[in-house]
Amino acid sequence: MMLEEYVPSEFVRKHLLNMKQNVMMIQFRKKLWHVKFSSHASSVSGVLAGGWTSFATENELQLGDICIFELVNKEDAILDLHVFRNHCKLMH
């Protein structure tokens, strides 16, 4: 299964619109992960795709986890990632 992480259009417009490379690096738990960034010109939004699935699987991201990305180096496209785990159980 391929997972994608959508990047809000406001963030893309402000920080990533004129980015030269399409690969970003995510820093998480003292490790760098290479993730492909694709932007959608029509909606000025984007997704983290290639590499994101491996990252999410290896770090056991779950539905309901909150990921906060912090752009720490625009020139080299490096993002710090902060994950807040969902500790709630879904009620049926």
Image (cartoon, rainbow, N blue to C red):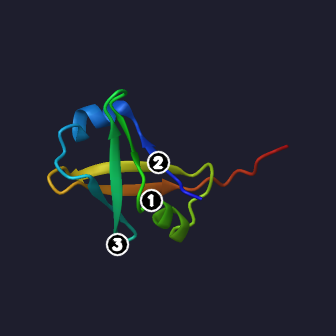
Sequence-first tag of 2 and 3: 2
**Image point (36%, 32%), residue name:** 9
Asked whether, in this view, residue 58 is left or right of residue 42, the answer is right
Sequence-first tag of 3 and 1: 3
Q: Which residue is mark 3?
A: 30
**Image point (50%, 61%), residue name:** 53
30 versus 25 height, above or below: below
For this orientation, the residue located farthest to the right is: 92
- Asked if disc 1 and disc 2 are in contact, CB closer than 8 Å, the reply is yes
Q: CA distance from mark 2 to mark 3?
A: 21 Å
> Could you say whether the residue bearing mark 1 is in a helix, strand or loop?
helix
The amino acid type, in three-letter code, at marker 3 is: Lys
The amino acid type, in three-letter code, at marker 2 is: Glu
Quadrant placement of the N terminus:
bottom right
Q: Which residue is mark 2?
A: 5
Q: Nearer the viewer, residue 83 or 6?
A: 6
Q: Which residue is mark 1?
A: 52
